[in-house]
Image (spheres, rainbow, N blue to C red):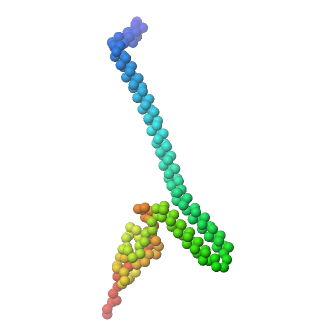
Amino acid sequence: MSDELNQTATSAPASDVAPAELDELRAKAAKADEHWDRLLRQAADFENFKKRAARDRQDAVRYANESLLGKLVPVLDNFEMAMAAANTAQAGSADALKTGVAMIHSQFRAALTEAGLEELDASGKAFDPNWQEAVSHQESAEVAEGQVLQQLRKGYKFRDRLVRPATVIVAKQPVAPATP
């Protein structure tokens, strides 16, 4: 009896479904399988992309200074040549050494400027605590109060970020002598 029941249960739905509907259901099932496979492939591709992007980010951070270092290596080479020349200096070569060091300084500044470093010159400008660090105030009748009287150390910024503030002395009004 159970065999008859199983046969009836399995054959009953097939007899209720028309052959055209069965073909349509099979086509939809095939399409669903195709979509499922495509979804799995895209999910795998996306996972691979995320892993590759993470690796690329790590490499970018790890080798971020490679370009700058490539520009600074020739400056280092020239400093080493200047030091070797200074060790074997002969009479009258001090001027040649001074010229060589000036050339290296120029090359070094050009490499840093090309990399995006910008010098902040505070001399004679109004004191700006965002870009300058005041180490003292000094009385001055020639310079207005709040103006930079003297720059002790240059400041630098990289694009729009401060690398090092300029160290300055800020002018203040002279104190009038006390009258007795």
173 lies above or below 42: below
- Of the 4 image quadrants, the one containing the N terminus is top left
Q: Which percent across, then down, holds residue 120?
A: 43, 69
x, y percent for residue 83: 63, 70
| Badge count | 0
Q: Residue at x 51, y 67 (%)?
A: 109
Left or right: residue 145 compared with residue 119 = left
* Residue at the farthest left position: 180
Q: Residue at the location (49% across, 42% down)?
A: 51
Camera sees residue 162: yes
Quadrant hosting residue 20:
top left
Residue found 42% across the figure and 27% down from its top = 34
- Identify which residue, 93 or 62, lies in the foreground: 93
User: Where does residue 50 sit, x and y in percent of width and height?
Assistant: 46, 42
The vertical placement of 136 against 109, above or below, is: below
Q: Quadrant of the C terminus?
A: bottom left
> Residue 118: x and y, percent?
45, 66
Q: Between residue 15 and residue 5, name the one nearer to us.
A: 15
Q: Is residue 135 visible?
A: no
Q: Residue at x 44, y 32 (%)?
A: 40
78 relative to 141 in the view: left or right: right
Q: In this view, which residue lies farthest toward the bottom? A: 180
146 displayed left or right of 89: left
